[in-house]
């Protein structure tokens, strides 16, 4: 689908709003978000029927929260969600494109992300708390503006968020960065309720559902309606960052950091205050508390279904399997066509029966799904030849031969990476795994400026080269394939 350009860009603060309260049977509406928040606060203060049970009264939600304070932040996010859905509807109206629409189930339009009991500011020297997400985001923006005002003209403004040392030249870039800490989403789909960082991401949400998708990824067979979406997707196939302690490579710096936390340290700094469980990452602790110690439940939004689950992940699986009737994927061996219901079963089969080895630095295989919902092992890996390695000095006690018990700051410091070059690399190394478990290495020189053209050129080149080398039965140590995609937009 070719996206039509908008004729004008409207600032968020100038958007026209039609906000509706969906508290139980309430029919209140207004055009100003402070009025909606004031109205919702009155519901929370006066309507004790829902507050005492901690059950969300918002239409098509019915979520049960663990405390009154969590219920209040949850309901305030519903009100904020109504506002950003108006932003999404306005953006959709301005596109003037009848084919641009969301085709997902409307029953999820009021399903919102998990909310804390309070939104707590983690800016250095500030410990303010909020129950209204919009007030919290505005508060953080003030911190960012003050940081830029306090910085000298010759220096960059620092991010004051706890344990973050990033710096930025402009207040716009600093605010954009801080949203990664606050997880602020600025728009929502008016149909399915999905939340997004920016206008571009929301338009991508509509574009991905265009049935006329004509740009296909040659690696995983996914289709996209624009070259930009295909290009952004293909970068996820390219590992551009390398762990400094082993041969593991990842597509993003955050993935390297997560790998180092899991593989190169035994420290579990996030302890549960209700049992002996301790986690390596804070998100894992939150999941543990939600599933094991919380009374919060997720009710199925479909009428007549009384399914309730403490995990939103299992609720999504329930909706997909029981109501949407989505077909389940089948894992199939590409050599002998034996089929399995789980990926780890196929992995064991490939290792024991076909002498496959784990990709360097990995503990599992990657699988690609075709249009028939059949998953097969990915036999080719792609890595940038200009891998960005960790720039920090690695402590002596942390190496590939000995298990590490380093502290969390040491691990995170070791995971700091340099930026990769923005210029597309034209020398390409490709490694493919044969059916007997051996690997074949080829180096090709590909002249292509745009990533999707580069991928197509590689495919055309390797079809002839790999078939010739495979017949020789080459057996070289397991390596990763290499490919470079420029960061053009």
Image (cartoon, rainbow, N blue to C red):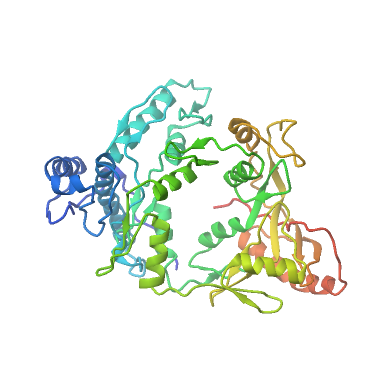
Indicate whether 154 appears above or below 327.
above
Q: Nearer the viewer, residue 332 or 209?
A: 332
Q: What residue lies at 17% left-to-right and 40% top-to-bottom?
A: 41
- For image coordinates 62% across by 46% down, the residue present is 259
Residue 440 place in picture, x, y as percent: 81, 65
Query: Is residue 444 positioned above or below 122 on the image?
Result: below
* Residue 463 percent across, percent down from the top left: 74, 73
**Is residue 455 shown left or right of residue 341?**
right
Q: Position of residue 268 (x, y in %)?
A: 56, 38
- Residue 220 visible? The answer is no
**Is 452 in front, or is 437?**
437
Query: Which quarter of the rendered picture does the N terminus lie within?
Result: bottom left
Which residue is more in the foreground, 267 or 128?
Answer: 267
Q: How many marks?
A: 0
Give the residue at the far bottom of this rendering: 337
Residue 125 lies in what quarter of the image?
Answer: top left
State left or right for residue 148 relative to residue 354: left
Q: Is residue 283 visible?
A: yes
Q: Quadrant of residue 304?
A: bottom left
Q: How far across and how far down the image is residue 218, in percent?
A: 62, 69
| Along the line of sight, the residue nearer the viewer: 57 or 344 | 344
| Residue projecting furthest to the right | 472
Where residue 437 sits, quadrant-wise, is bottom right
């Amino acid at each position: 689908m070719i996206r039509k350009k908008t004729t004008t860009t409207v600032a968020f603060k100038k958007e026209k709003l039609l906000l509706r309260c969906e508290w139980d049977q309430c029919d209140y509406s207004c055009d100003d978000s402070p009025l909606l928040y004031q109205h919702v606060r009155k519901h929370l203060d006066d309507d004790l029927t829902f507050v005492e049970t901690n059950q969300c009264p918002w239409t098509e939600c019915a979520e049960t929260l663990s405390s009154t304070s969590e219920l209040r932040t949850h309901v305030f996010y519903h009100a904020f969600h109504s506002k950003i859905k108006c932003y999404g509807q306005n953006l959709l109206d301005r596109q003037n494109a009848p084919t641009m629409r969301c085709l997902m189930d409307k029953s999820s339009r009021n399903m919102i992300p998990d909310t804390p009991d309070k939104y707590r500011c983690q800016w250095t020297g500030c410990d303010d708390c909020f129950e209204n997400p919009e007030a919290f985001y505005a508060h953080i923006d003030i911190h960012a503006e003050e940081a830029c005002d306090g910085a000298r003209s010759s220096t960059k403004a620092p991010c004051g968020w706890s344990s973050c040392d990033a710096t930025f030249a402009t207040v716009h870039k600093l605010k954009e960065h801080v949203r990664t800490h606050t997880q602020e989403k600025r728009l929502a789909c008016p149909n399915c309720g999905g939340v997004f960082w920016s206008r571009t991401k929301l338009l991508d949400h509509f574009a991905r559902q265009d049935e006329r998708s004509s740009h296909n990824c040659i690696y995983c067979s996914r289709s996209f309606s624009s070259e930009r979406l295909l290009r952004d997707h293909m970068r996820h196939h390219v590992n551009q960052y390398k762990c400094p302690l082993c041969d593991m490579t990842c597509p993003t710096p955050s993935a390297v950091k997560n790998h180092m936390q899991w593989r190169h340290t035994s420290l579990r700094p996030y302890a549960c205050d209700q049992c002996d469980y301790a986690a390596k990452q804070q998100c894992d602790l939150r999941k543990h508390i939600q599933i094991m110690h919380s009374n919060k439940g997720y009710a199925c939004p479909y009428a007549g279904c009384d399914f309730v689950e403490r995990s939103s992940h299992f609720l999504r699986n329930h909706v997909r399997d029981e109501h949407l009737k989505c077909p389940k994927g089948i894992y199939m061996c590409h050599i002998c066509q034996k089929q399995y219901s789980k990926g780890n079963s196929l992995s064991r089969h490939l290792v024991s029966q076909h002498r496959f080895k784990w990709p360097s630095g990995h503990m599992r295989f990657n699988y690609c799904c075709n249009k028939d919902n059949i998953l097969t092992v990915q036999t080719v890996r792609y890595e940038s030849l200009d891998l960005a390695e960790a720039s920090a000095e690695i402590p002596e006690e942390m190496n590939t031969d000995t298990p590490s018990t380093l502290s969390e700051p040491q691990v995170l410091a070791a995971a700091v990476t340099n930026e990769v070059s923005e210029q597309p690399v034209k020398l390409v190394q490709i490694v493919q795994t044969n059916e007997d478990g051996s690997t074949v290495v080829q180096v090709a020189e590909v002249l292509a400026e745009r990533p999707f053209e580069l991928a197509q050129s590689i495919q055309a080149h390797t079809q002839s080269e790999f078939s010739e080398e495979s017949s020789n039965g080459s057996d070289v140590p397991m390596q990763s394939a290499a490919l470079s995609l420029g960061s053009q937009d």
